[in-house]
Amino acid sequence: DIVMTQSPDSLAVSLGERATINCKSSQSILYSSNNKNYLAWYQQKAGQPPEVLISWASTRESGVPDRFSGSGSGTDFTLTISSLQAEDVAVYYCQQYYSIPRTFGQGTKLEIK
Amino acid sequence: EVQLLESGGGLVQSGGSLRLSCAASGFTFSSYAMSWVRQAPGKGLDWVSGIGGRGRSTYYADSVKGRCTISRDNSKNTLYLQMNSLRAEDTAVYYCAKGSNDSSGWYFNLWGRGTLVTVSS
């Protein structure tokens, strides 16, 4: 199984500042035949189901604000929120869809400082 | 409206069974892989099982293999999860999640609100 490890476990950032969450996979999730990284990022607000923000490591889903961006390749990935808004308080998860079983990182709790 | 609506959760004794259902609407159900993902109280996300669009391919996490069966009825736009020999560690909110496509690389681009399964020992 591919193990996904996020850092940090929790993060407090001031409004308007940048937030950065890291995700590392135990093996490469870059598929060589199409040069795509099989990684998604999800946001889960309190009491709600998760919502996908980013797919293919760096593609924003429709309707996701452009302050959210994803980067990285191979085994190391980053979710960046360029200017934190109050509504961004949530737990963020990375997930690989390169292989079965699908696996998630343990989550990063993002709060306002 | 595009949505997923789970049902069938509840309180069950250890060793018991439950059947979860997920009614889909607003998209061509048979064109997408579907999955169940669970979340224990206060914990992270845990993929449980997945099924291809036509129902021929099924996938399970090791933690539920042999105890759970995923199925779908495309004529009813409904996904199911039959859970047997339930254990306390199966206690969680179970989410139905739509795959982004029906090929090999699907992530989850639509989630239901979940149904709570509580297993008492």
Image: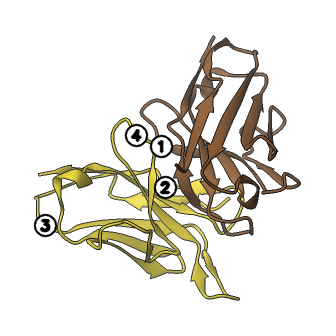
Chain colours: A yellow, B brown
Residue at disc 3, secondary structure: loop
What's the chain of the residue with tag 4? A
Asked whether the residues under the numbered discs 3 and 4 touch, taking CB atoms below 8 Å apart as contact, a structural biologist would say no
On whether disc 3 and disc 2 are found on a single subunit, the reply is: yes
x 68%, y 22%: residue: B87
Q: Earlier in the sequence, mark 2 or mark 4?
A: 4
Q: Which mark is residue B44?
A: 1
Residue at disc 4, secondary structure: loop
Q: CA distance from mark 1 to mark 2?
A: 8 Å
Kind of residue indicated by mark 3: Glu
Residue B116: quadrant of the picture: top right
Residue at disc 1, secondary structure: loop
x 65%, y 64%: residue: B106
Asked whether the residues under the numbered discs 1 and 2 touch, taking CB atoms below 8 Å apart as contact, a structural biologist would say yes
Residue A35: quadrant of the picture: bottom right
On whether disc 1 and disc 2 are found on a single subunit, the reply is: no
Q: Residues within 10 Å of mark 3 (few under 14, many from 20)?
A: few
Q: Residues within 10 Å of mark 1 (few under 14, many from 20)?
A: some
What's the chain of the residue with tag 2? A
Tell me the residue that label 3 is attached to: A17
Can you tell which of label 2 and label 4 is closer to the viewer? 4
Tell me the residue that label 2 is attached to: A105
Determine whether B20 is above or below B60 in the image: above
Q: Which mark is residue A48?
A: 4
Q: Which mark is residue A92?
A: none
